[in-house]
């Protein structure tokens, strides 16, 4: 399982993903799910994946190959003129990989499916955030839907709904995401650390803060304990129920 979140702030974009792809007593696997590309001063792009691991690795490998291969292997996400066209290219690549893998072709319930969060900024344009579906189509974040989640979304969603503010700082956004991920990891062992954090600051056209947060990280541990204590105090402060 997976949990990934992309936030659209007034200041830019913030992304976080876990790294766990297996969750059994003797089957805990870690694979990176957050990938980046950039041309400093011109564009910065982040992609996060959930779903079938072979599918997501094939998609990322194809995108990566097309940024480095000879000129006839185009299009490249480092050359496409808008983030909308980057999203179309990623969607086409995802659909191509799923269709070639599934023996009966593309199906909504295919075990080869994957969902992607894609975000970034190209010089001269606004930062944009997309969710790309297995069929290759996609939607874009806006004022009414300023963030996307993929994977195991239900446990970490309540804190995002209640506390997200597009005007918040990057530091508060990272804290919010850690609370959301901690709630998810407490409820579902298939999501786990280390966590990957990536920031794209508006109008810098480069990758910003990047950090891997281990489960033993002192700040993460303080957030986890503090959030648990705060919930207990809030619960105790509520008026008692009377039959």
Image: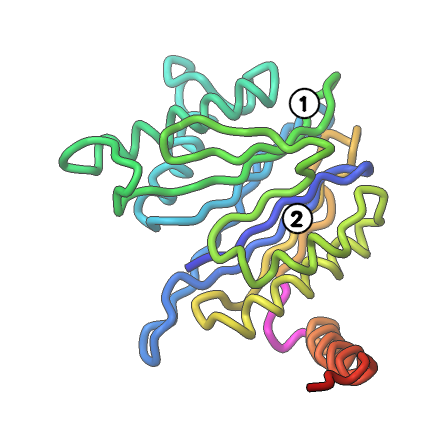
Question: Which quarter of the image is occupied by the N terminus?
Answer: bottom left
- Give percent across and percent down for residue 14: 69, 45
Tell me which corner region of the image, top left, top right, bottom left or bottom right, holds residue 179.
bottom right
Q: Nearer the viewer, residue 49 or 203?
A: 49
Mark identifier at residue 122: 1
Q: Residue at x 64, y 33 (%)?
A: 141
Q: Find the magenta span and give its range.
A: 213-217
**Residue at 69 percent of width and 54 percent of height:** 160
Horizontal relation, residue 61 to residue 109: left or right: right
- For the residue pair 225 and 18, the one nearer the viewer reads as 225
Q: Secondary structure at mark 1?
A: strand
Residue 214 among magenta residues: yes
Is residue 14 located in the magenta-colored stretch of the structure?
no
- The image's mark for residue 42 is none
**Residue 198 disc label:** 2
Q: CA distance from mark 1 to mark 2?
A: 17 Å
Whether residue 44 appears in this view of the structure is: no
Give how far across and how far down residue 51 sits, in percent: 38, 49
Q: Percent position (x, y) of residue 125?
A: 72, 19
Q: Residues within 10 Å of mark 1 (few under 14, many from 20)?
A: many
Q: Is residue 146 left or right of residue 192?
A: right
Q: Is 194 drawn above or below residue 227 in the view shown?
A: above
Q: Secondary structure at mark 2?
A: strand
Q: Quadrant of residue 24?
A: bottom left
Quarter of the image where the C terminus is located? bottom right
Spot occupied by residue 155 in the image (x, y as percentages of width and height): 56, 63
For image coordinates 56% across by 48% down, the residue present is 149
Q: Residue at x 15, y 34 (%)?
A: 104
Counting residues from the start of the chain, the first of labels 1 and 2 encountered is: 1
- Vertical relation: 43 (above or below) 14: above
Residue 172 visible, this angle: yes
Q: State the scheme by which the image is colored.
A: rainbow
């Amino acid at each position: 399982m997976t949990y990934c979140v992309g936030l659209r702030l007034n200041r830019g974009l913030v992304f976080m993903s876990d790294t766990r792809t297996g969750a059994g007593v003797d089957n805990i696997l870690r694979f990176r799910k957050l990938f980046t590309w950039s041309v400093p001063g011109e564009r910065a792009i982040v992609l996060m994946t959930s779903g079938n691991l072979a599918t997501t690795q094939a998609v990322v490998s194809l995108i990566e190959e097309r940024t480095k291969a000879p000129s006839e292997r185009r299009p490249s996400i480092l050359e496409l003129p808008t983030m909308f066209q980057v999203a179309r290219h990623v969607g086409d690549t995802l659909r191509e990989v799923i269709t070639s893998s599934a023996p009966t072709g593309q199906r909504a319930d295919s075990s080869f499916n994957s969902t992607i969060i894609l975000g970034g900024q190209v010089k001269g344009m606004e930062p944009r955030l997309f969710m790309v579906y297995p069929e290759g189509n996609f939607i874009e974040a806006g004022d009414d839907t300023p963030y996307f989640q993929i994977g195991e979304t239900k446990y970490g969603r309540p804190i995002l709904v209640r506390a997200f503010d597009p005007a918040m700082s990057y530091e508060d956004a990272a804290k919010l995401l850690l609370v959301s991920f901690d709630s998810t990891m407490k409820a579902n062992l298939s999501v786990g650390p280390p966590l990957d954090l990536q920031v794209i600051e508006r109008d810098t056209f480069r990758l910003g803060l990047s950090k891997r947060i281990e489960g033993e990280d002192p700040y993460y541990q303080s957030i986890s304990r503090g959030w648990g204590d705060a919930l207990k105090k809030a619960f105790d402060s509520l008026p008692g129920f009377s039959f």
